Image (tube, rainbow, N blue to C red):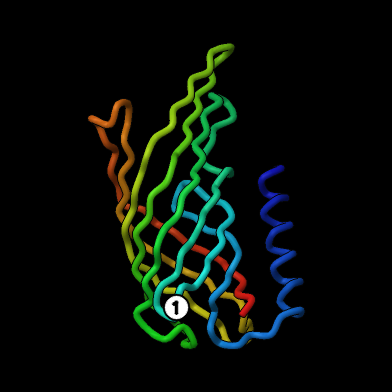
Amino acid sequence: MKKFKSILLIIAVLFTAKSAFAQDGNRKIGVGLQSSFPLYGISAKVGINDQIMAQAIVAPFGASSGDVGYSINFYGARGIYRFTDPDRSAVPYAFAGAGLIRSTFEYGSTSTSANLLGWSIGAGVEFFPNFLDNMGASLELGYGSMSVGTGDIAIRSMTYGFGLHYYFN
């Protein structure tokens, strides 16, 4: 419930801020929510130029199970390449990123934690509805991998993601 309230608060701030800033069409600075199933959290995007963006993601709201006490959190960054002009209503892009995955398992009085390195690549489309000039919603498909243990073993899978970002300029 605490996670849900945090997400609602972030969305409320983003929609409130929408009326305070004018859109100049560049979409260079954005904040919002980003998810790559099963992880989700807050995100900031900064445009290097019209085609290249840097994105930082902090996902402390990762997958968890209250019965067992298992949680996954993610902290990372990625580069985004936009294939078209960012002024369009649909902007296709490709991304590549890396980060730290924090895994914690608790059972009774026993607790085990591990830091895993991971990376991902993929593509998506960000949509900018005409009635919400500064808001963008993205859908993406990717491929990711994370090391397990000493790095000799890796878990690889398809990733499915979405994002909701407010752009300040």
| Horizontal relation, residue 39 to residue 158: left or right | right
Q: Residue at x 49, y 78 (%)?
A: 127
| Horizontal relation, residue 100 to residue 169: left or right | left
Q: Residue at x 60, y 75 (%)?
A: 167
- Residue count near mark 1 (Cα–Cα under 10 Å), binned few <14, some 14–19, many ≥20: few
Find residue 6 and report its horizontal and vertical position in percent.
Answer: 70, 50
Of 158 and 47, the residue lying toward us: 47
Q: Residue at x 56, y 58 (%)?
A: 43
Q: For the view shown, which residue lies furthest in the left direction?
A: 152
**Residue holding disc 1:** 49
Of 37 and 31, the residue lying toward us: 31
Of 98 and 70, the residue lying toward us: 98
Residue 30 figure quarter: bottom right
Amino acid type indicated by mark 1: Asn
Find residue 137 and report its horizontal and vertical position in percent.
Answer: 52, 71
Q: For the view shown, which residue lies furthest in the top direction?
A: 109
Find residue 90 and report its horizontal and vertical position in percent.
Answer: 44, 82
Query: What is the count of numbered marks?
Result: 1
Residue 1 figure quarter: top right
Picture layout, residue 101 above or below residue 35: above
| Horizontal relation, residue 94 to residue 48: left or right | left
Find residue 139 and report its horizontal and vertical position in percent.
Answer: 44, 67
Q: Quadrant of the C terminus?
A: bottom right
Q: Residue at x 53, y 13 (%)?
A: 110
Picture layout, residue 72 above or below residue 98: above
Secondary structure of the residue carrying tag 1 is loop
Picture layout, residue 37 above or below residue 19: above
